[in-house]
């Protein structure tokens, strides 16, 4: 896995930093014994934000990595990408 952050992923760093701040906020809310429904609402907001990042990265993967494998007509690469996506979908549906 590459340690260099591509331009497409840099946009997601900002989102992840925001989510990280929200998680710290929830920790503070719990430590301060805030109202449970307020905490749950913040958790739901984080889940939504994570789902958004997940879909953006998945879309990038499909439009970049999967298309690249398909354009090379390399059956092994295409099969690997399909297997990866199927595992991802199976784990999501659990």
Image (cartoon, grey):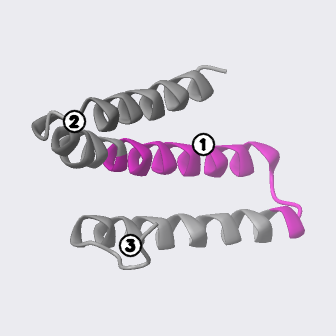
In the image shown, does 13 or 7 lie closer to the viewer? 7
Q: Earlier in the sequence, mark 1 or mark 3?
A: 3
Q: Is residue 12 magenta?
A: no
In the image shown, does 87 or 44 lie closer to the viewer? 87
Residue extending furthest toward the bottom? 4
Q: Mark 1 to mark 3: distance in Å? A: 19 Å
Q: Residue at x 30, y 46 (%)?
A: 61
The residue singled out by tag 3 in the image is: 14
Residue 68 placed where, x, y %?
17, 45
Label 3: state its secondary structure. helix
68 relative position to 26: left or right: left
The residue singled out by tag 1 in the image is: 44
Residue 94 placed where, x, y %?
67, 21
Crowding at dot 3, Cα within 10 Å, few <14 / some 14-19 / many 20+, comes out as: few
The reply to whether callout 1 and callout 2 are in contact (CB within 8 Å) is no
Q: Residue at x 37, y 41 (%)?
A: 55
The reply to whether callout 1 and callout 3 are in contact (CB within 8 Å) is no
Q: Give the magenta-colored segment's residue range.
A: 30-57
Label 1: state its secondary structure. helix
Q: Is residue 38 magenta?
A: yes
Crowding at dot 1, Cα within 10 Å, few <14 / some 14-19 / many 20+, comes out as: few
Q: Mark 3 to mark 2: distance in Å? A: 35 Å
The residue singled out by tag 2 in the image is: 74
């Amino acid at each position: 896995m590459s340690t260099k952050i591509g331009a497409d992923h840099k946009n997601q760093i900002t989102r992840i930093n925001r989510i990280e701040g929200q998680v710290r906020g929830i920790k503070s809310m719990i430590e301060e014994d805030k109202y449970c429904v307020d905490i749950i609402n913040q958790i739901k907001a984080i889940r939504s934000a994570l789902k958004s990042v997940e879909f953006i990265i998945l879309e990038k993967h499909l439009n970049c990595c999967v298309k690249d494998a398909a354009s090379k007509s390399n059956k092994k690469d295409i099969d690997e990408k399909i297997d990866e996506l199927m595992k991802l979908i199976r784990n999501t549906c659990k």
